[in-house]
Image (spheres, coloured by chain):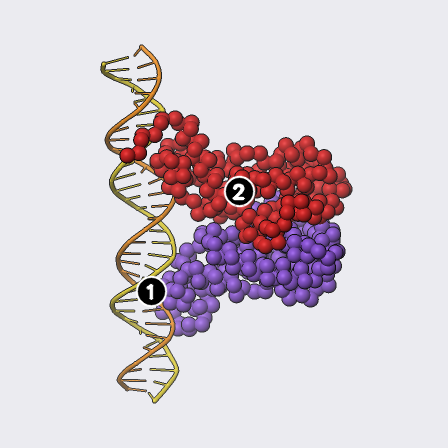
Chain colours: A purple, B red, C orange, D yellow
Amino acid sequence: MPEPRRRDAAATREALLGAARDLISRHGVEGTSTRDIATAAGVNQTLVYRYFGSKEKLITEAIDNSGTTGEKIIAETPLDELPRALLEHILDASAARRTNSYSALLSSTNDDTLRELVRGKLEKAFTVGLAARLAGPDAALRAELVIALLSGIALLRDKLGTKAISAAGREEIAAHVERMCAPLLRG
Amino acid sequence: MPEPRRRDAAATREALLGAARDLISRHGVEGTSTRDIATAAGVNQTLVYRYFGSKEKLITEAIDNSGTTGEKIIAETPLDELPRALLEHILDASAARRTNSYSALLSSTNDDTLRELVRGKLEKAFTVGLAARLAGPDAALRAELVIALLSGIALLRDKLGTKAISAAGREEIAAHVERMCAPLLRG
DNA sequence: CACGTAAGTAGTCAGTTGTTGACTTACTCC
DNA sequence: GGAGTAAGTCAACAACTGACTACTTACGTG
């Protein structure tokens, strides 16, 4: 018989959050049930409701408090090194299957509330953070185009597994990304 | 009382396909049930199984035989006008809520079979079609980076509704896209 | 050492999903 | 006009989902 679980509320909460992040990054929000999450966390399903109240609140918290959104990178990296740094940040995150803004973005829920959350996080980090560092008009649009490119790369690489992008070395991709972003970074 | 439905197998099939395309482009594959589709088509739900055998086969056919994948555009448009032409193609399609490769890509299913299908269509159109027109090494990768950018734009604009990209005029976006793609199109 | 409370569990409910089988009805061809 | 078949309908299934209630047990405090 299964030995009774050690009682540790904080650890249980964290286990649920971690399992949720892992599963939704692989199977999407609607492809992940509360039972899946609880099982992966080694925890009773009811505890989802004890600690979070609802599936949506669990998912929301899992996405919201997940790793860095890259805001630090955006604020501190020299402008001309930024595209490369952001690319690496994205590729690392998806490799580690950590759910950050990007992979959450790719898990592409149909839940409006969650989409709003992801949009908000993304805009806070990029449209505001990056645009502030860009000179000239159109700064917000250009900032979003940078993240559009990076999101597209993550989508093709991690979600679809498209041949060329999946096979390419990080360095190759980075070189092209730099050249693509250069005209955006100049005012 | 509801007047009995006219009997027309071909029309019913087509109605189901059309409704499927419309609904999955808005709510995603797993967010759309066979009952939703049938209701939208004004048809009995079980006819999904008479005509297609399973939900997956219906969705597969809906995505597979859906509009142009842009292959014609890729084959015939002068290289330097291509980014703009493709961008307009994508934006038009999502505006008309036609399910083409791009919006299917964005509906981002967790079903492996469907992902394979979308990947195949995309690669057929881009990695092959576009890469063939690019000189120099790396052609396949550069082709996929073009579609990555366009996919990212569609994702942010249609799925997330990010502020700057949603508000920007088509012409503004096109101008930036051209500048971003230019280094990729040159060998 | 009690003992109250927080942590964990079992069982279940109502709703939805994909799917199936048996039924009825309309239309076509002889 | 009557049979045969294709088209459409109905009711129900088993599995799964998010959610809830009632019960049991571990553990720190007094």
- Amino acid bearing label 2: Ala
- Name the residue type under label 1: Met
Residue toward you, A124 or A138: A138
Q: Position of residue B116 (x, y in %)?
A: 53, 42
In this rendering, is residue B82 above or below D25?
Answer: above
Q: Residue at x 44, y 62 (%)?
A: A57
Q: Are marks 1 and 2 in contact (CB under 8 Å)?
A: no
Q: Residue at x 62, y 34 (%)?
A: B71
Quarter of the image with the N terminus of chain B in it: top left
Q: Residues within 10 Å of mark 1 (few under 14, many from 20)?
A: few
Q: Residue at x 36, y 65 (%)?
A: A2
Which circle marks residue A1 in the picture? 1
Residue A156 screen position, x and y as percent: 60, 47
Is residue B73 in sight in this rendering? yes
Q: Is residue B85 left or right of residue B24?
A: right
Tell me the residue that label 2 is attached to: B104
Q: Classify residue A86 as left or right of residue B51.
A: right
- If the image is split into quadrants, where does the C terminus of chain B sit? top right
| SS at mark 1 in the image | loop
